[in-house]
Image (cartoon, rainbow, N blue to C red):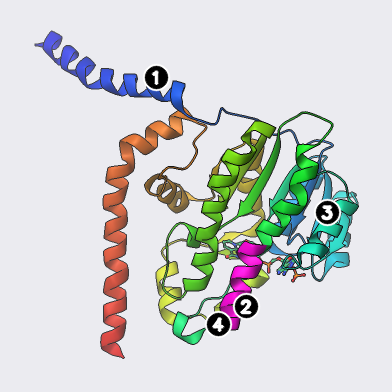
Amino acid sequence: MADSNLSSLALCILPLFMILIFLKFIVRPHPVKIPVKSRHVFITGGSSGIGLALAHQAATEGARVTILALDNLEEAKDYIRLSTGIDVTILKADVCDFEAVKEAVESVGPIDVLVCNQGVIVAQEVENLDVKEIGRIIDVNLVGMFNLVKAALPGMKNRSDRKPVSIAFMSSQGGQVGIYGYTAYSASKFGLRGLAEALQQEVIAADIHVSLIFPPETYTPALAKAKKSMPRLTSTITAFSGAMQANEVAKKAWKGIKSGRFSITCNLEGFFLSIVTAGVSPQRSYLMAFIEVIFAGVVRLGVLCVQWSWYRTIEKFDEVK
Ligand SMILES: NC(=O)c1ccc[n+]([C@@H]2O[C@H](COP(=O)([O-])OP(=O)(O)OC[C@H]3O[C@@H](n4cnc5c(N)ncnc54)[C@H](OP(=O)(O)O)[C@@H]3O)[C@@H](O)[C@H]2O)c1
């Protein structure tokens, strides 16, 4: 009896073990570590919120940091100097203006870690958004990323030190799932996924590694501003995922960038969403690939229940109206 139990256990475990071994050989790209000490880290939107927390984190770990934004640059520089004793370089440019971005990037020399973090958050139903506002959201959150990559890539490819380098894009949980009121914002963040996946294939030969970061709601000036005009349904639906502090998000993002991870999540909901939305995205870790392969179905069941509750909320809201 004990023998037959043992052999049925082995029969269950053996296929899982074989899948794990298979994944170890096939996951791509290969694992990588991005060194940051004494290297040039360039963070856009580094004057506030998550970007400022990232700049602070990078400076404390001995990186040479440049931040680019529109305003509040001196304040950000002073804040980092006062808390770390380190001076960062500040650049003023609008990411939507390619010539200004190119000039700014060229003025500081080759970049080792480019964190494309700038963004605007607008929560409003598409019917209540005017087309100019939709254009601005797509321009800052998506087209601006292309401008940065186009400006930085030649220097990153021709770097003299041959160590691995990184390009990271700040997406959002709104880039993993479309949410009521985030039509334009989610579209801009979903666009980043296509950019990041295709770019990783284009730059892998140059030892450039792409990351895509998916924070949940984070207490920052951008969120506080968005909350002021946020539809009630958006607030109700997004309440399912707790908000984080900017420095917590920055720590998770920074750790993920240094480990060369493609998908970087910041909390448990983000982790589950990354399993169910893994699709054809690159995966360096065979253990994470194993979790995706084995658990995608059951996590899909969980998120279908979440979708059910969202649609129930929307139906009830319509009834009350
Ligand atoms: N907060 C959240 O709940 C949350 C959640 C998920 C993802 N995110 C993402 O995290 C990123 C940072 O957002 P945050 O919440 O930290 O917002 P934030 O505190 O308002 O910071 C946004 C940064 O982007 C800069 N920026 C905006 N438009 C720009 C432009 N046209 N050119 C250059 N810089 C520009 C801002 O500079 P100025 O202040 O000088 O304009 C600021 O430094 C965004 O991509 C956002 O979508 C945020």
Disc 4 crowd, CA 10 A, few/some/many (<14, 14-19, 20+): few
Q: Are marks 3 and 4 in contact (CB under 8 Å)?
A: no
Disc 3 crowd, CA 10 A, few/some/many (<14, 14-19, 20+): many
Mark 1 and mark 2 lie on one chain; the one further toward the N terminus is 1
**Front disc: 4 or 1:** 4
Return the residue at label 4: 131
Magenta stretch secondary structure, dominant: helix
Q: Quadrant of ligand 1?
A: bottom right
- Compared to residue 220, the image places residue 272 above or below, namely above
Residue 234, image quadrant = bottom left
Considering depth in this image, is 85 or 278 the residue closer to the camera? Answer: 278
Q: Position of residue 306 (x, y in %)?
A: 31, 61
Q: Which residues are magenta?
A: 131-143
| Residue at disc 2, CB closer than 8 Å to ligand 1 | yes
Q: Residue 225 has which mark?
A: 2
Return the residue at label 1: 21
CA–CA distance in space, label 2 to label 4: 20 Å
Q: Are marks 4 and 1 in contact (CB under 8 Å)?
A: no
Q: Position of residue 178 (x, y in %)?
A: 42, 65
Residue 102, image quadrant = bottom right
Q: Identify the amino acid type marked 1.
A: Ile
Mark 3 and mark 2 lie on one chain; the one further toward the N terminus is 3
Considering depth in this image, is 152 or 262 the residue closer to the camera? Answer: 152
Residue 305 part of the magenta segment: no
